[in-house]
Amino acid sequence: MPSENFSDGILSFKKAEALQKERNAETSDKFQDISLRLLMLFLLK
């Protein structure tokens, strides 16, 4: 089901975001921009 895949995607997305913020706070702005683009692509599928 699409909703299950969506939930899994969101969980992976949040995990990746948390890891990136822990690893390097300086790049968090860039990562947010990239994350937003990825999220938009994900939602548009």
Image: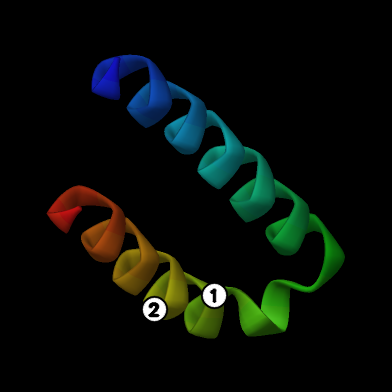
x, y percentage for residue 24? 79, 73
| Residue drawn at the location 69% of the way across and 83% of the way down | 26
Give the label on residue 22, or none: none
Most extreme residue toward the right is 23
Give the label on residue 31, or none: 1
| Residue drawn at the location 50% of the way across and 26% of the way down | 8
x, y percentage for residue 27? 65, 83
Q: For mark 2, does the 10 Å Cα neighbourhood hold few (<14), some (14 to 19), or many (20 or more) residues?
A: few
Give the label on residue 33, or none: 2
Q: Would you say the residues marked 2 and 1 are in contact, meaning their CB atoms lie under 8 Å apart?
A: yes
| Residue drawn at the location 31% of the way across and 73% of the way down | 37
Quadrant position of the N terminus in the picture: top left
x, y percentage for residue 16? 66, 51
**How many labels sit on residues?**
2
| Residue drawn at the location 43% of the way across and 66% of the way down | 35
Helix, strand or loop at label 1? It is helix
Give left or right: position of 8 versus 2.
Answer: right
* Nearer to the camera, 41 or 31: 41
Q: CA–CA distance between discs 2 and 1?
A: 5 Å
Q: How is the image coloured?
A: rainbow
* Nearer to the camera, 20 or 45: 45
Helix, strand or loop at label 2? It is helix
Above or below — where is 9 with respect to 35? Answer: above
Residue type, numbered disc 1: Phe
x, y percentage for residue 29? 49, 80
Above or below — where is 23 with respect to 17? Answer: below
Residue type, numbered disc 2: Asp
